[in-house]
Amino acid sequence: MTGFSCVAVCGLALALAGCGGPAAPNSAPKPQAAAAGTEQVTRIVEKYWDDRLPAENGISPQYLADSLSIEHRYLAEILAVPRDALDAKTRLTYDIFRRRREVIVEGFTYPSELLPIDPIDGMPHDLAAYAAELAARPSTKAADYENWLKRIDAYVRWTQQAAVNMRDGVRRGYTSPRALIERILPLLERLGADDPGNVFYGPIRSLPDGIQAADRAKLTRDMTSAVSQRLLPANRSLHDFLQKEYLPRARAGLALSDLPLGNQWYAYRVRRATSSDLSPEEINRIGIAEVERLAPPAAREAAAVSAPAGGLVNAYRELQTQVQAALPMVVAEIPKSEFDIRAADWLPRPDMDLYYQARGADGSPPAVLYVNTGKGARVAPSIAGFLQQGLPGHHFQSAIQQERMDLPRFRRFGVEPAFTEGWDLYASSLGEVLGVYNEESAKMDAASAQMRCAVALVVDTSLQAKGWTRAQAFDYLHAHLALDDLDAQLLIDSFAAKPGDALACIGEMKFRALRARAQQGLGSRFDLRDFHSEILKDGAMPLDILETKMKAWMDAAK
């Protein structure tokens, strides 16, 4: 990958626009060869989508072996296709598919299955959120509850496999940070308690009358048994294993570099998150420069206080209407898909204001923007947050991608962190054009989002690759972000739980750089709406591949 290599020399955001992706062929392919190549690539990528394994127990040895075999097979198949014989559209699919297979295959080098516990938004959180959603919006289809029962069984198997893997990790020198285990124990204790208030009993209480009486009675019996006899005991068993057996053996530090192959592992996670060849040291320097550029912090969030759920949700719905009407000012094409806005108090992190759930490949779950209405919720909507998570950010990008029926399914429903998160953060900078940053507080909120990204670049890399202690990270966060102590500690633990993931926001610099380059190159012919539409229309992709695509677009526009 080549995406950001030039940044090591100049260290400036605009330098990101000078790095090239896959080179375009010198001459156009012959029509007959191009048609044959298109057919071959289409067959490969669509068959891959059908053959990929569901990630229900993605940490079992058999699953891992089978998945690696599939990835190797399809990587070999795509490499056997002559790239230069493909037309431009098919080359784009080829490049994205090949890159994703290469990245995934490389990831099997590192035993992430030995560190399965994620206290920030891991498997227990996902299952609890699913139960809460099913209880809040009951289905009238018995099949949906049968699927819920299957999901419970899959989760129980996951908890058992997690314990097996973690014992193996202890033997091999791969253990999770003690702080992360301590953080998840209270959650597992709550999720294992056999009392009526447990979130897992919610779908049973809310079974709708629309399901036939006989089916409802059977589902009630089956779900009650599944929860009380299998699910809750599984959480209690996992809790006891972690507390009594694993916690005394967990590592004191937070850095992935403490583990065998740790430095290489972190460098890989950095490349995966940023879709670049930037080293942790280079990312760190970019982060420091961004913090200095944005300092002093323009955004100091107002103290959070509780707010009535309905009032805050309605305020976001009004903002949605306002932004929707202004979207033609920044994009030429608007997706048809809509999203709901709902109150929630179970967001993956309590410091989140908003959490976007993309629509599933089969339409379930639906697209939803969840609003944090729990303790410490905001009294007023975060306009910058809405632009990031809703329109024209995460939902907008995801909806455009999914509505492109001519794209292969792996592209319609695929993810590229640096593209997605980079676009989200970039979207928050469009508030003035959209006419929603009329108040100084809204502009400060947007500046705060940029500062949060810059600080993440510094703290994540410093914790993982430069030997920082928790105390050093804590002091740096307090020096540059308006966080209370609990949120600062939570953010540090999120860096430890997902090393490198927070660096994906660096993609925002690529979007800014590409825009500056297009404005400079096209002059009066530059159209912001067309630029954004070209960025988004082909879905998420590695940033160096995006750059090659955008260069071709700019050359054609000239």
Image (cartoon, grey):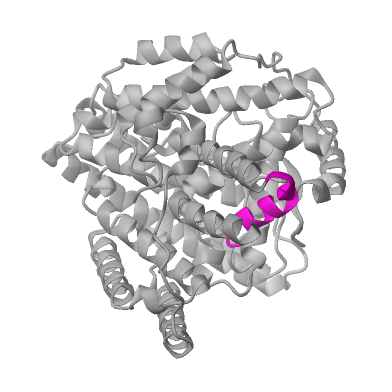
Q: Is residue 535 magenta?
A: yes
**Quarter residue 369 falls in:** top right
**Quarter residue 39 falls in:** bottom left
Residue 30, horizontal then vertical, whole percent = 44, 85
295 vs 157: above or below: above
Residue 105, horizontal then vertical, whole percent = 27, 59
Residue 493, horizontal then vertical, whole percent = 41, 26
Left or right of 348, for residue 355? right
Q: Is residue 455 magenta?
A: no
How many marks the image carries: the answer is 0
**Which segment did they paint magenta?**
523-538
- By secondary structure, the bulk of the magenta-drawn segment is best described as helix
Left or right of 411, for residue 217? right
**Quarter residue 211 falls in:** bottom right
Q: Farthest residue to the bottom: give it.
A: 32
Most foreground residue, 231 or 531:
531
> Residue at (23%, 47%) from the top-left corner?
110
Residue 357, horizontal then vertical, whole percent = 62, 50
* Quadrant of the snapshot with the C terminus: bottom right
Could you tell me if residue 87 is visible in this image? yes
Most foreground residue, 401 or 194:
401
Could you tell me if residue 205 is visible in this image? no
> Residue at (82%, 43%) from the top-left corner?
323
> Residue at (62%, 22%) from the top-left corner?
448
425 vs 110: above or below: above
> Residue at (30%, 54%) from the top-left corner?
59
